Amino acid sequence: MRRIGPRVEDLPDEALLAGFAAGDPELAAAFVRTFQSKVYGVARRIVADAGTAEDVAQSTFERAWRHARTYDPRRGSVGAWLGIIARNLAIDAVRVRPVVPVDATALLRAMTEEDGGASRPERAALEAESVTTLRAALRQLPTEQARAIVLAGIAGLSANQVAANERIPLGTAKTRIRTAMLKLRSGLHQDGPDHA
Amino acid sequence: MHDLPCATCRDLCPEVALGAASAEDRADVLAHVERCAGCAALLRSMTDVGDGLAALVPPMEPPPGFEGRVLSAIRERGGRARPAFGQRLRSRPLTVAAAVAAAVALAAGGWLVGETTSAPSSAAVTSALVSRQGTAGTVVLVSGVRPWISMTFHVGSASGSVECEVQDASGRLVALGTFPIVHGYGSWAGPLPQGTTVRGAWVVTPDGRMLAWSAISGG
C-alpha cells in the first residue's frame, strides 16, 4: 500500500521524532535523512577526524531514540535539540583526546555565514528568527570575543585551553568569554521575552 | 565544594553554560543555583545562548551509508533491549503507560523485530491538537499493518498525568493510555486496535476534564 496524505518528508519534525522513537521504519528513515547533515555537521566541526565524527553523529541519533520523550518543543526545534546533543557528545569525545589547535577563524566564518544550519527551505523559515538573531549578534562581537566564545561553546575548549589556543592570559580568556556571552544574551533578549 | 557568593556564581555562569568551566567550578555553580532562583535564571538564559550556538553550525553530508548504519545500530539496540524489558514485565505490575510503551516496543515498527526499512508503507494523517488557549500539539495517525497513534501536547506549565482517548466511527470513546505531563509538555505513542477508524482524539485529565482535542479527517 502506498502512503497517502502528506509525504513523510512533509510531516512536522515532532511527528518524525515520534515515529522514529516508536520504531516506524519509514518515518525513522525520513527522520535520519532529514537531520543527518545537521548532526554530522556539528560533530565534524568539533572533532578532528571523520571516523570519530561519524561515531558521534550515530550516538546522537541513538540518544535521541532513547530519550525522545524528553524533547520539549518550547526549548527549541528538533534540529536544535539534536544539534545540542551532538555538540555535547562531540565535546565529550574531544576531551578524552590530546588537545589540538583549533582554527577559530574557519569555525567563526562558517557559523556567521547565511543559512548555516537549515537543512531545507521550510526549516530555514521556521528557524530563521532565533538563528538569524543570534548570528547577527555573533557578527557584531569584536573578533577576539567571537573567537573565544565559539572556541568554548562549539569547539568545547575549557577557558584554560582557549587561553592557550589564543596565546592570551587565562584572565583575558575568561573576560572575553564572559563579555561575549553577556552581549549575545542581550541580543537574544531584545528579540523577545521567550529568548531571555 | 564551596558556598559561592552570587557575584562569583554569576562570573562563572558563562563558562558553565558553554561547558568550558572546570569540574569544580561547575559543581559549585550547580550547587548554588539549586538554592538561588536569580542565578538559576541567569544560568538558564546563558545555557540557551550556548545551545543556540550549535544551531549556527552549517550542515555537512555524512559519509555514504550513514543512514543505514544508524538504523541498523538502533535496530540492534532494540533487539537486545527486549529480554530485559520482558524481565521487568514479570517482576512488577505495569502502569497503563508502561503497558502501552511495551506494546509499542514489541508490536509497532518493523525494525525492532528485524525487518528492513522497505517494510510495507502505511498511511499517515497529521492533525492539530487544540485547547482553549490555541494550538496545543500534534496528533499523528499511522495506519497499515500495525496502526498506531502518537501525540505531542504542550499547554501551560502544569505537571501531572493525562489520558489519551479516541472516538471511533461509531462515536464510541476508547481510552488508549496515560502519559505524564512535565512543566506543560508531554508526548506519547501507542498502538491502535486494528480496523479502528479514528474521528477524534482527546487529552483528558484523570478526573475527566478535556484539555485539548483534535478533529481527525481521513483517519
Image: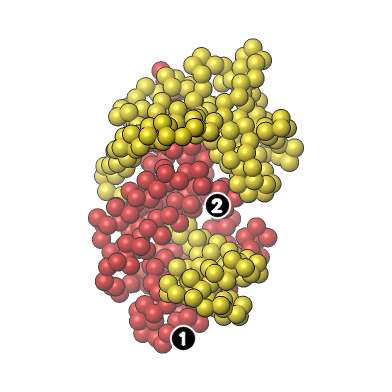
Q: How many marks?
A: 2
Q: Chain of mark 2?
A: A
Q: Chain of mark 1?
A: A
Residue sitting at the far top: B170
Residue picked out by circle 2:
A76
Q: Is residue A105 left or right of residue A126?
A: left
Q: Colour of chain B?
A: yellow
Residue visible at 67% across and 49% down in the picture = B157
The reply to whether residue B188 is in sight is yes
Return the mark for residue B64.
none
A38 versus B46 height, above or below: above
Residue visible at 48% across and 63% down in the picture = B53
* Identity, as a three-letter code, of the amino acid under mark 2: Gly
Q: Quadrant of residue B107?
A: top left
Which type of secondary structure does the marked residue at label 2 adopt?
A: loop
Residue picked out by circle 1:
A171
Q: Position of residue B38 (x, y in %)?
A: 66, 69
Whether labels 2 and 1 belong to a single chain: the reply is yes
B170 versus A79 height, above or below: above
Q: Is residue B95 left or right of residue B114?
A: right
Q: Position of residue B124 (x, y in %)?
A: 50, 26
Badge 1: residue crowd in 10 Å (few <14, some 14–19, many ≥20): few
* Identity, as a three-letter code, of the amino acid under mark 1: Gly
Q: Quadrant of residue B199?
A: top right
Gap in angstroms between the C-alphas marked 2 and 1:
33 Å
